[in-house]
Amino acid sequence: MTMDYTGDISEKDIFRLQDAIREVSTYNFSDYSYNSFYRRIEKILSDFETDIETLIRNVKKDYNFLEKVVRNITVNTTEIFRDPETWFFIRQAIEQRFAGCENINIWHAGCSTGLEVYSLMILLNEMNLLEKTSIYASDINANVLNTAMSGRYKYHELINYLDNFDKALNESENMKKNYPSVDMTKYIKVNKFNDNVQMADFLVEKPLFIKHDLVSCKNIFEKKFEMILCRNVLIYFNHDLQNKVITFFYENLTKNGCLVIGRHEGIIGTVGANFEKKESVYFRKRTF
Ligand SMILES: C[S@@+](CC[C@H](N)C(=O)[O-])C[C@H]1O[C@@H](n2cnc3c(N)ncnc32)[C@H](O)[C@@H]1O
């Protein structure tokens, strides 16, 4: 017999939990999308085999438990060369705007296990730009950052996405027409029998991975960025928080900088007027 631990979680319960988290930590989920936060809490109650009252009590009294809850609130789905067709537009943006810069700073905000970071580094290497680029990558979840830092993945977890490499770099009509094909074995070692996929050392050594909460809207890197990628993260925030974070990104882009968001995400409202859009790439408009 399976137990239903979720019972009826009321809106009040959700707010009490968010208040409890805020009281004992710097985390603030009050401006996350209510529906997606609710679904995560339902899942946590079921996975942890607990009820909402016990969850709130334990969050208040045990910081390690709270960290575990936070790690479970976040959705970490990611892929190598996710949305393959987007990478041509990312390549074009870099080529047209920053290829001539002396140094290029790029920030992956909400990088999860780092597959997006490795994808971009591969692209930059093919463009002969990797050396002069500094790569920063952050996430709220320390566990996924550990995986990102190792550059090591389970083959069975990546098997459905490895094809994205060819789809993005070798099979897309746009890429085929404009650029030479790319050999995956230069960058990624696949060992099916050991269930292991390992990124090349020179890629693993390159980025600075760091824990950072976007809700804080603090630029811990203390520099402006040519490109910020924040893909498939904003969907978990409500409109107010989306606007706040997008404005924060705008302020931390160089004057020619651009923001890349997820394929199914958009920037709406007055903050959108600060950008010019090409596919998923939003170029910062200059202010005079
Ligand atoms: C769905 S994944 C997207 C990963 C990658 N950008 C991609 O598109 O494949 C969303 C990531 O955002 C992170 N995240 C959620 N809330 C965050 C916050 N407040 N600050 C920083 N990262 C956050 C999650 O931990 C998760 O790893």
Image: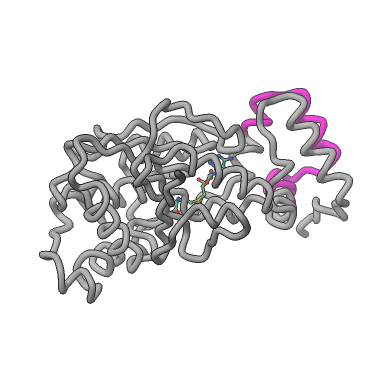
Q: Is residue 85 left or right of residue 111?
A: left
Q: Is residue 224 left or right of residue 58?
A: left
Q: In which quarter of the image is residue 282?
A: bottom left
Residue occupying the far front of the picture: 288
Give the percent coordinates (x, y) of residue 175: 20, 69
Q: Is residue 191 left or right of residue 73?
A: left
Give the percent coordinates (x, y) of residue 84: 33, 66
Q: Nearer the viewer, residue 198 or 241?
A: 241
The dominant secondary structure in magenta is helix
Q: In this view, does 208 lie to the left or right of 50?
A: left
Quadrant of the rendering where the N terminus is positioned: bottom right
- Residue 172 lies in the magenta stretch: no
Specify how the rendered protein is coloured: one colour
Which residue: 47% across, 26% down? 220
Which residue: 34% across, 46% down? 256
Give the percent coordinates (x, y) of residue 20: 79, 31
Q: Is residue 235 above or below residue 148?
A: below
- Residue 54 lies in the magenta stretch: yes
Residue occupying the far left of the picture: 180
Which residue: 62% across, 52% down? 236
Which residues make up the magenta segment?
42-67
Q: In this view, does 44 lie above or below 202?
A: below
Q: Quadrant of residue 107?
A: top left
Give the percent coordinates (x, y) of residue 270: 61, 55
Quadrant of the rendering where the C terminus is positioned: top left
